[in-house]
Amino acid sequence: MSHGTGPTRWQAAWLQGARRRGPMACLLWPVSLLYRGLIALRRQLYAAGIFQVHRVDVPVIVVGNVVVGGAGKTPCTIALVAHLQAQGWRPGVVSRGHGRSGTGVTHIDADTPATEAGDEPLLIHRRTGAPVCVATRRVDAARALLAAHPQVNVLVCDDGLQHLALGRELAVVVFDDRGSGNGWMMPAGLLREPWPPAPGVPFRPDIVLRQGREGGQTAAAAAPGMPTFDAVRRLAAHATGPRGQRIPLKELRGQDLVATAGIARPQVFFDMLRERGLSLVQQVALPDHADASVYAALLRDCPHPVICTEKDAVKLFALLPPGAPDAPVKAWAVPLELTPDPAFFAAIDARLAALQADR
């Protein structure tokens, strides 16, 4: 059984339609040309200095995508931050904090409510322990983070590819199995900006990371002259509970579970759970960055244990009553693991080494 909210169904239908050049895409194509022109004009204004690009005192690595609907930016950010930490860097993360209630600068710690932090920045902090700061203007977040954490010597900007006001030394564009969709710009297609970018275009990304499910194929999203690497995404072999419990995923087989996902493509998560042999009696697709009240309604009406993504758990776990230590667990979260080719990290390391040599 599967259901979702009205906007979720509409979004899913549009995302699917934007992968081919069908009647609706053709109808919207003239609008996409206008959007393409506005994007090009905005880039030129930044490149000419009419719109200001703000620099900070440490290297900035931007992780983003050129398609709508989520392509794995946050798992890539988490993997990149963990690698930088292992290499001896002291990274910090800045983000806009999509879905949060405020607009000002917020420094995130493990107890910051998701309504103030945004679900993805809070997840990044909890997974990596790195300093994370959010603000509507990412340059404000960057300056505030560096002032509060002077030990930070590299910044990772999560979902900042189209945010040109914060200067960057390196930009990584992430693709999933959809590639560039039908190759058209929004709203006729999935693209936020033209792909592949023409040589010499301002703010051209530096590296492509194509991520795909374990055993699947990655999309052909390379650009001429741009280093391109692959990454495998898979569910972890365990699930985590609201009090830090940890259980092998295989031990949940045979239980009736209700799966929920408030991400851009919930069905992908549901399919991955079934591939691990889990029995889903219900699938509840929620809008990306769903409000906490939606999770509260789900928990109130659900007779079975809930299984969700780590991103959902940021909000959902906070709604569960404390319960006794030996009480049955009402919700589990399954981490998503992203494993890039070692050559991807080698390319990042080489670029940072070159930046250090030039400073």
Image (cartoon, rainbow, N blue to C red):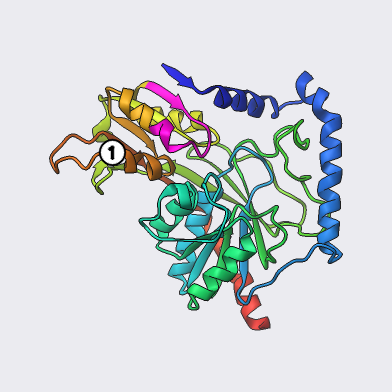
Which residue is located at x 77 percent, y 25 percent?
Answer: 25
Report if residue 302 lies within the magenta region. no
Quadrant in the picture for residue 86: bottom left
Q: Position of residue 218 (x, y in %)?
A: 60, 40
**As drawn, 282 above or below 134:** above
Quadrant in the picture for residue 219: top right
Report if residue 282 is visible in the image. yes
**As drawn, 22 above or below 320:** above
Which residue is located at x 40 percent, y 55 percent?
Answer: 112
124 left or right of 330?
Answer: right
Report if residue 347 is visible in the image. no
Quadrant in the picture for residue 343: bottom right
**As drawn, 317 above or below 206:** above
Q: Position of residue 185 (x, y in %)?
A: 77, 37
State the residue position of label 1.
Answer: 320
50 left or right of 104?
Answer: right
**As drawn, 15 above or below 195:** above
Which residue is located at x 62 percent, y 60 percent?
Answer: 138
Q: Position of residue 345 (x, y in %)?
A: 54, 62
Q: What kind of element bears circle 1?
A: loop
Q: Quarter of the image for the C terminus: give it.
A: bottom right
- The type of residue carrying mark 1 is Leu
User: Front-most of 238 and 257?
Assistant: 257
Report if residue 287 lies within the magenta region. yes
Q: Position of residue 17 (x, y in %)?
A: 68, 24
Which residue is located at x 86 percent, y 64 percent?
Answer: 48
Residue that extends furthest to the top in the rendered view of this protein:
1
74 left or right of 49?
Answer: left
User: Front-most of 208 and 312?
Assistant: 312
Look at the image and give the residue range highlighted in magenta. Answer: 282-295
